[in-house]
Image (tube, rainbow, N blue to C red):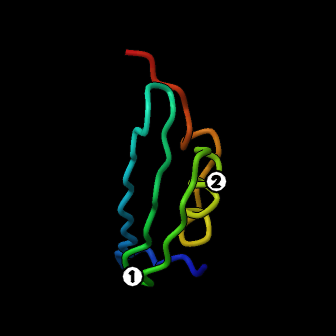
């Protein structure tokens, strides 16, 4: 993964789908748009690891619980 130069913009896109099968049961699918790579997941950390293959992510940022 090569970092863009300071004057260069690097866009990496993903689509995520969440499917609720039953109350408290779900699964997801994440797709990297540029490569069309796709992965099914049931744990958020698996999706984070997939994203980390394409962009540098800090574990503290993705997967952080937000209480509303």
Q: Quadrant of residue 13?
A: bottom left
Q: Quadrant of residue 59?
A: top right
In the rendered image, residue 26, in percent from the top left (x then y), is placed at: 48, 40
In the rendered image, residue 38, in percent from the top left (x then y), is placed at: 49, 72
Q: Nearer the viewer, residue 43 or 49?
A: 43
In the rendered image, residue 46, in percent from the top left (x then y), is placed at: 64, 53
Contact (Cβ within 8 Å) of mark 2 with mark 1 = no
In the rendered image, residue 8, in percent from the top left (x then y), is placed at: 37, 79
Q: Residue at x 46, y 24 (%)?
A: 66
Looking at the image, residue 19 lies above or below residue 7: above
Q: Secondary structure at mark 2?
A: helix
Q: Residue at x 51, y 34 (%)?
A: 25
Q: How many marks?
A: 2
Kindly report the distance in space between the C-alpha atoms of the residues bearing marks 2 and 1: 19 Å
> Which of the numbered marks, if any, corresponds to residue 34?
1
Q: Identify the mark nearer the N-term, 2 or 1.
A: 1
Please give the residue where the numbered disc 2 appears in the rendered image: 46
Neighbourhood count class around disc 2 (C-alpha, 10 Å): few under 14, some 14–19, many 20 upward: some
Q: Residue at x 58, y 81 (%)?
A: 2
Q: Nearer the viewer, residue 19 or 64?
A: 19
Image quarter hosting the C terminus: top left
Q: Tell me the mark number nearer the camera, choosing from 2 and 1.
A: 2
> Which of the numbered marks, if any, corresponds to residue 43?
none
Looking at the image, residue 16 lies above or below residue 6: above
Q: Is residue 54 left or right of residue 21?
A: right
Image quarter hosting the N terminus: bottom right
Q: Is residue 13 left or right of residue 55?
A: left
Q: Residue at x 35, y 73 (%)?
A: 11
Q: Secondary structure at mark 1?
A: loop
Looking at the image, residue 57 lies above or below residue 13: above
């Amino acid at each position: 993964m090569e970092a863009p130069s300071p004057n260069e913009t690097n866009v990496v896109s993903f689509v995520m789908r969440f499917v609720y099968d039953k109350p408290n049961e779900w699964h997801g699918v994440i797709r990297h748009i540029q490569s069309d790579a796709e992965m099914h997941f049931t744990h958020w950390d698996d999706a984070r690891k997939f994203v980390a293959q394409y962009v540098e992510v800090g574990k503290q940022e993705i997967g952080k619980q937000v209480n509303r």
